[in-house]
Amino acid sequence: MALDGDLPRPLDWLNPGSQLVRPSAPRAEAPARRVHLPILQTKATAQPASHRPTQPPLAGPLAAAYTRLRRSPLGKLLRKSKPRPGSGLPARRSIVLLRWARRASQAFFLFLFLWLLTQTAFRGSFSASSGTPVRLPFPVEGFLLADPFVALITVLSSFELYAGLAWSLGIVLLTLLVGRAFCGWICPFGTLHHFLSYLWPAPSGRGSRRVTANHTKSWQTWKYYGLFGLLGAAAAGSVIGGWFDPICILVRGVGLGLLPVLQYLGIRGLERVSASDSLALQQGSDSALDFLSTHVWTSEQAHFHQTWLILITFFAIVWANRMIPRFFCRALCPLGALLGVLSRFAPFGMEKDHAKCTDCNLCLTHCQGADSPQGGVKHQKHECHVCLNCEVACPEDVIKFRFFPGLRSTKAEPDLSRRTAILGAAAGAALVPAGRVANWPDKAYSAKVIRPPGSLEEREFLERCIRCSECMKVCPNNALHPAFLEAGPEGVWTPILIPRIGYCEHSCVLCGQVCPTGAIQKIEEKHKLGQGVPPVRLGTAMFDRGRCLPWAMATPCTVCEEFCPTSPKAIWVEEVWVPKRGAVSRAGVDAAPEQVKVKRPHVDPTLCIGCGACEKVCPVVDQPAVYVTSAGESRSKTNVILLEDSAYADVPVSPG
Amino acid sequence: MAGRRTSTAPDPEAEAPTIDPALVHLRPGRREILRQTLTTTLLAGASLALGGALYRPPGFEHHPSTSERQVRDFRVAPGPRPTVAIAKSSLDPAELTRRAISGLGGIERFVSRGDIVAIKPNIGWDRTPAQAANTNPRVVAEVVRLCLQAGAHRVVVTDASCNEARRSFQRSGIWRAAHEAGAEVILPAEHRFREMRLAGELLDHWPVYKPLIEADKLINVPIAKHHNLSAYTGAMKNWYGVLGGRRNRLHQNIHLSVADLATFMRPSLTVLDATRVLVRNGPQGGNLSDARDLNQVIAGTDEVAIDAYGASLIGVDATRVGYLLLGQARGLGRIDARDVVEV
């Protein structure tokens, strides 16, 4: 067959976005082609018989309900596929199987991700002895460790491939072999977009409009320029790429947003049920709450400071799927862009027989990457998610995925302007000093930027913290929260401790365990407790004597001292006699002031570790009478108060 | 309705263009008028009825406190036996526990066949057994075993911790020890608290930890410790663990709060762990040098007498502990109880 004669003019090839209007000649040829494929043809002609309209399996109202269900969005899962149009050639069996394997893989990795996210909490165990160190049993941060974009930005900023991030090499190798299969087969955020854009497209995003939406668009290059900008910022010392990384967005959106929202609704709903008079309903809802609190969420309602912005961002990204399928993956995802660049030399790819294409556009209806699978234009390999939908859909034997495909119909690298790319990287790099001029970490210490225990010094911290929120999710006391502007514009969504909401548990090191990049180091209990080494300090507690009950109101309290976890306690009390106003009646003060003995609390700054337990339990709730600020944090050499913190030198070491 | 929308395609046979019937002003039929009237009437009536049912007049409602004092009484009938039994001089906490309880007449006096027994140890802190801030897990496990031997249907071990609960349960060793002894260990969670009237002198409405009050028998298994504010903590103050909510306010009048709680919760049996006690830096400790080995377990039915003895163990004069005096004044027990035996 004279292939070259059927190919479009070269001019159109350079414009991948254009849908070529093909002459009708190949369509007229179609019947003649069937002669060459007698076996396939018999199958194809036999096809319509098996697709005769079948009677609904049930009669009466049940049948009506079944019909309604089939017409609903969820009914897509029940509908049978339509007869293949055109020549009706069936897809290769291996490709059909591979597509099912892809679907299974997507479901598996999405559930694995969600399961790991729900396990990002210390559940405890009845079989652990009292000496067992408290750690999570699973690598809950696994998806972040395998994320090459996270690995690359932290390597650029810190010149190290930190520990578990070496797993990302696996995804790099996969991409070098088969292209962006991660996006189509593994990425849980991609799967979410894939499923939602399939299930609930907007009316304006169906039918022929969906085909149009799936054409390659010029704005798909945004993500590459974004990638260069984020790499530039990383090279300048700040991994703000975490704002856009798909795994980070998903952990933040689901872990800090969706899951607490579901928890709120679940607890509220089930407690309503539990308040009923029926014993069975009470027991049922109680068991449901028990299960949910021990397996899905935690025993207390989770709160996250400032989550509204995270949730709005998350839902906006998800909502975009209604109009443009996988808008985030196509236009914004920096990880997808990185894998797109890596996929260039992958030996696996698509081969097209343009001559056979009848422009039926079936390949485009379910195209994920908007990578031009249709005939007449070059396949954009760097956009392709290797989902294989196009080959399965093609009734004309045009598309073939294989190793070492003919490259004439493939375009492997994105259409980028070198000048814009360099400018993008430079702009990204310039963002960092711009942000730091406004908020210089060494000059304007924020009292509220209390970093998790084991955090690196602020600059090194910002070189590594990808704002994935794993530490906030795992914190057993709900003490860590995404910052808004407390840590400057560049510190948005980095973790800060808000002791008013929760304090840092004395022997807990879980945030360091789950941190994928080492922004929070994997410290051990002895570093927290100060056994043989100086303890990690987050800041220092201060008393507001105008609000403290014993100081200002002659009322006993000292809950702060009770909760102070160090030994000897950093909060100490002096017993003093203070005047207390006499009994008061309508007539005025009836009695002379009486002398009462109260214990007035003080902080010993040489012993205080800034855990915030005192602030958490202070009964002056709204603006506590004792509060922790970052001053004296052991990670900083300059944000210090005392000349020397030598008080620990003579404290005896105690185990456990 | 369906008949109104017909094709607007021009009829080839008609000479003049026809008017779209959908544009012709048609009056609804009698049937439709009736249906519409009925619907409107029903909706109006339903709105008024719903509004009336949900109506609340303006004003600030105040529920005056009732004077009736609430009590969760799990006590068993008093016998001729002593009210307090002290077991000493053994290095095995389990044996001490057994001896102390048998000194009172055995566990069968307190637990009947088929009972649901709730055991309330002190699991307040993220501390290991050697740090002596929580009840010794072997004492708890022995009480569980005795209850099951006495034929208890279910034994629940739980507490509403001060530090993070799962960590406190695991690191105190009580989770494992109680589970291995056959108890059901319940971890505190938000939904396990219920707002209740305590109607005490000081404490009125508080969230109460349900697993501790939904039982047939209740056994208090505290540890004797130093306490920074109340000087000593043991059996009576252990009932802080039955409350949820903002317990940090209780310290403003710690003695009256403790007395109120001990009046509200009357356990079947109290087993005070004094195998190893905190003598300073209480109630958390944190340092091994804060604790002393005493190797004693005290069982009894009089919380005041038990605490008076426990206080003496850490060098605190019971007659100077406010809540013990209040407890005695309320008739919860006697500081100078006479029927104390050493077994």
Image (spheres, coloured by chain):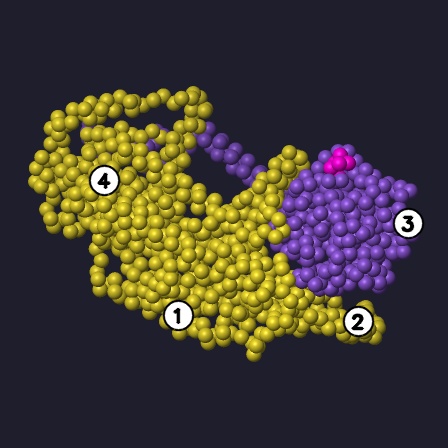
* Cα distance in 3D space between marks 4 and 2: 87 Å
Residue under the point 91% across and 42% down: B80
User: Circle 4 sits in a helix, a strand or a loop, which is it?
Assistant: strand
Q: Color used for chain A?
A: yellow
User: Circle 1 sits in a helix, a strand or a loop, which is it?
Assistant: helix
Do the CB atoms of the residues marked 1 and 3 lie less than 8 Å apart? no
Q: Which residue is mark 2?
A: A596
Q: Which mark is residue A133?
A: none
Question: Crowding near pointer 3: few (<14 within 10 Å), some, many (20+)?
Answer: few
Q: Color used for chain B?
A: purple
Q: Which residue is mark 4?
A: A402
* Cα distance in 3D space between marks 3 and 2: 37 Å
Question: Crowding near pointer 1: few (<14 within 10 Å), some, many (20+)?
Answer: some
Relative to A223, is B117 above or below?
above
Q: Which mark is residue A435?
A: 1
Q: Residue furthest bottom?
A: A643
* Cα distance in 3D space between marks 2 and 1: 53 Å
Amino acid type for the residue under numbered disc 2: Val
Amino acid type for the residue under numbered disc 3: Asp
Q: Position of residue B5 (x, y in %)?
A: 32, 32
Question: Crowding near pointer 2: few (<14 within 10 Å), some, many (20+)?
Answer: some
Q: Earlier in the sequence, mark 4 or mark 2?
A: 4
Relative to A301, is B45 above or below?
above
**Residue B186 painted magenta:** no
* Cα distance in 3D space between marks 3 and 4: 91 Å
Nearer to me, A505 or B52 = A505
Amino acid type for the residue under numbered disc 1: Gly
Q: Which residue is mark 3?
A: B339
* Image-based side of A179 in relation to B321, left or right: left
Q: Magenta segment, which residues?
A: B147-152
Asked if residue A16 can be seen in this view, the reply is yes
